[in-house]
Image: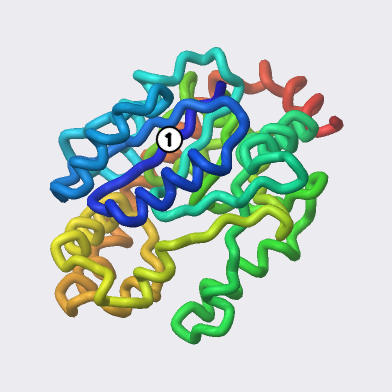
Amino acid sequence: MINIYILTYNNYKLLKICVQSIINRTKFPYNLIIVDNNSTDEELLNYFSYLKNHKNINIHFNKNNLWVLGLNPALKKYQDGKSEYFVVTDADIVVPTIQNGRCWLEQLVYEMNINQVIGKLGIGLDLGYIKSRNNFKNTYLREDGYYSNPQIGQNFIAGVDTTLAIYRHDFFMHKNPRFFPGHGMMNRPYYYTCRTGKNLNCKHMGWRSYSNPKLQNIKDQKSKVICFTLMGAYLDPAFIGHLPFLLHAFYVIFRPFSRGVWAINLLIYQFLWFIKSTPSKLNQIQYQAKK
């Protein structure tokens, strides 16, 4: 049984599509935990009430919108350590259909089982929607460029935060899984971060809303920009391009400062881990590297 965590905030339509795709296209045993960052949308809250009738779906409510930090209380509550893996996804993802009798989660677990040096494996993204759109040119080049990287089995080494990924329980330097800005650099050094090949892709519905201002609520835009700025997080240029001037300026001016603060936090954690774990972990690192 694997826990699947969906982080969401005021995005009823996208979340509903995401949840239905998981329900309809997942054969591997799972528990679905929807982590809500203090949404206010009545339609979404009503949907949560409906989902509570599903025996393997839980809703975790946070009191504030703290982006990826919102995952931590849910992980602490639901992650019992019995499963070697867990999955985290954004709410604007549609998982792949079942292929050759094997669902997307079965495929991810299989790849993790046979490639012990992979600590985090993200599903690749279907690039068809952004391939010919000029406002996504840089995004497309970056995403497509990952497929030129070295491979581990059928997977490509890519040190990025994919929008849906499976993690080993001990992937992070922390004793227990924990997310915060910069967590992509907190993997134990004997683990690689990878993404699947083009044969296993999910749809990123968020790209469609980025490129269509009519699909974006101004209030939610403001909340997202403020949250991401304070966390030093990355916003896609296609999304930023439609922002009101003051929101755009706030992000551009203050994000570098926030990134610096979180970078210091990251360096402290890394330093403490290496002090505690080296050289005691050296043999394990060498063993994993040779497998």
The answer to which image quadrant residue 102 occupies is top right
Give the side of residue 40 with respect to residue 177, left or right.
left
**Colouring convention used in this rendered image of the protein:** rainbow
Name the residue rendered at 63%, 22% in the picture.
278
Percent coordinates x, y for residue 25 in the rendering? 57, 43
Give the side of residue 145 with respect to residue 42, left or right.
right
Determine whether 192 is above or below 260 in the image: above
Q: In this view of the protein, can residue 4 be seen by the observer?
A: yes
Name the residue rendered at 18%, 77% in the picture.
244
* Furthest-right residue in this view: 290
Name the residue rendered at 74%, 49% in the picture.
155
Give the side of residue 174 with respect to residue 26, left or right.
left
The answer to which image quadrant residue 223 occupies is bottom left
Determine whether 93 is above or below 146 in the image: above
Percent coordinates x, y for residue 158 in the rendering? 64, 53
How many discs appear? 1
Instruction: Please state which of residues 253 and 135 is positioned toward the viewer in this rendering.
Output: 135
Percent coordinates x, y for residue 142 in the rendering? 59, 69
Instruction: Please state which of residues 264 and 132 is positioned toward the viewer in this rendering.
Output: 132
The quadrant of the picture occupied by the C terminus is top right
Q: Amino acid at mark 1?
A: Tyr
Determine whether 26 is above or below 58 in the image: below
Q: Which residue is label 1 attached to?
A: 5
